[in-house]
Image (cartoon, grey):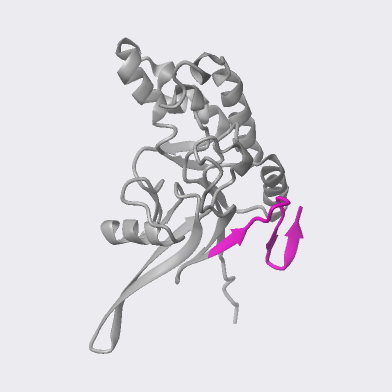
């Protein structure tokens, strides 16, 4: 009798690089891991580019720095090295449209200033999603800024999951954690929703808006997917930029 080969899809999920403020050691180690691990997909839940030159904190200072082109090029290189395949919209990358809308609305509609074109995602082989990205029939990826933010990792994603009626993987909070909510009736489990926050890849010493205090956890996430369901796994990154996956240390 011929046995069917069991197939488990492996997905890496990253969040909140916020180039040029990304942790270069962590992203370098992550890139080497991805090259060796060969995941089926690498998902980014947004905030890959900080866009600090057009933020509300930039007026009269960073807006004159002239670094936006260099920052974009660096971000493209990082996304290429990390082999990212899908990205969802996020509050930082929304800054391009919002800045045009408030300062230069006459430029809205130029194809080259639409965020996916501005970033050259097509050339990088990246699909950009303005709506939740459907990972499986009952798991989606969103950025995480669509509802209130909770102080403990996993709870923001869980609230999003309750709103969508599907399990959610997200970022935005810079926190890492998994939290679930189940329903049952008559002793029978009727449903389970899971919220998965994957952490961040930012260099905290460059986080200009925290004033030195924050409740963040560096890291990324893994999703193991087969026909029976999805298993989320958090991967914390330590201060040196290294981490352990499946019993092996990287970095």
* Residue 224 at x, y percent in the picture: 54, 64
Q: Residue at x 51, y 55 (%)?
A: 198
Magenta stretch?
A: 233-251
Instruction: Work out whether residue 47 can be spotted.
Output: yes
Residue 40 belongs to magenta span: no
Q: Total of numbered circles in the picture?
A: 0
Identity of the residue furthest to the bottom in this view: 187
* Residue 179 at x, y percent in the picture: 42, 67
* Residue 57 at x, y percent in the picture: 44, 27
Q: Residue at x 37, y 52 (%)?
A: 149
Residue 135 sits in quarter? bottom left
In the displayed structure, would residue 50 be above or below residue 25? Answer: above
Residue 246 belongs to magenta span: yes
Q: Residue at x 56, y 59 (%)?
A: 222
In the displayed structure, would residue 127 be above or below residue 133? Answer: above
In the displayed structure, would residue 57 be above or below residue 149? Answer: above
In depth, the one of 208 and 126 nearer the eye is 208
């Amino acid at each position: 009798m011929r046995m069917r080969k069991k197939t488990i899809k492996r997905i890496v999920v990253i969040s909140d690089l916020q180039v040029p403020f990304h942790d270069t050691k962590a992203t370098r180690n992550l890139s080497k891991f991805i090259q060796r691990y060969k995941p089926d997909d690498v998902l980014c839940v947004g905030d890959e580019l900080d866009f600090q030159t057009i933020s509300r904190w930039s007026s009269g200072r960073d807006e004159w720095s002239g670094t936006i082109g260099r920052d974009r090029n660096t971000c493209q290189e990082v996304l290429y090295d990390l082999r990212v395949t899908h990205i969802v919209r996020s509050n930082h990358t929304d800054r391009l449209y919002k800045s045009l809308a408030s300062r230069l609305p006459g430029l809205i509609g130029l194809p080259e200033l639409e965020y996916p074109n501005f970033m050259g995602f097509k050339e990088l082989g990246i699909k950009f999603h303005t709506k939740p990205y459907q990972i499986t029939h009952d798991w989606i990826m969103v950025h995480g800024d669509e509802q209130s933010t909770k102080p403990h990792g996993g709870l923001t994603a869980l609230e999003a999951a309750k709103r969508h009626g599907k399990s959610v993987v997200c970022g935005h909070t810079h926190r890492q954690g998994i939290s679930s909510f189940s329903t049952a009736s008559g002793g029978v489990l009727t449903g389970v929703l899971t919220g998965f926050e994957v952490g961040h890849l930012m260099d905290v010493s460059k986080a200009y808006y925290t004033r030195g205090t924050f409740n963040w956890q560096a890291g990324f996430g893994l999703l193991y997917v087969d026909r029976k369901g999805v298993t989320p796994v958090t991967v914390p990154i330590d201060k040196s930029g290294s981490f352990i996956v499946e019993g092996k240390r990287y970095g």
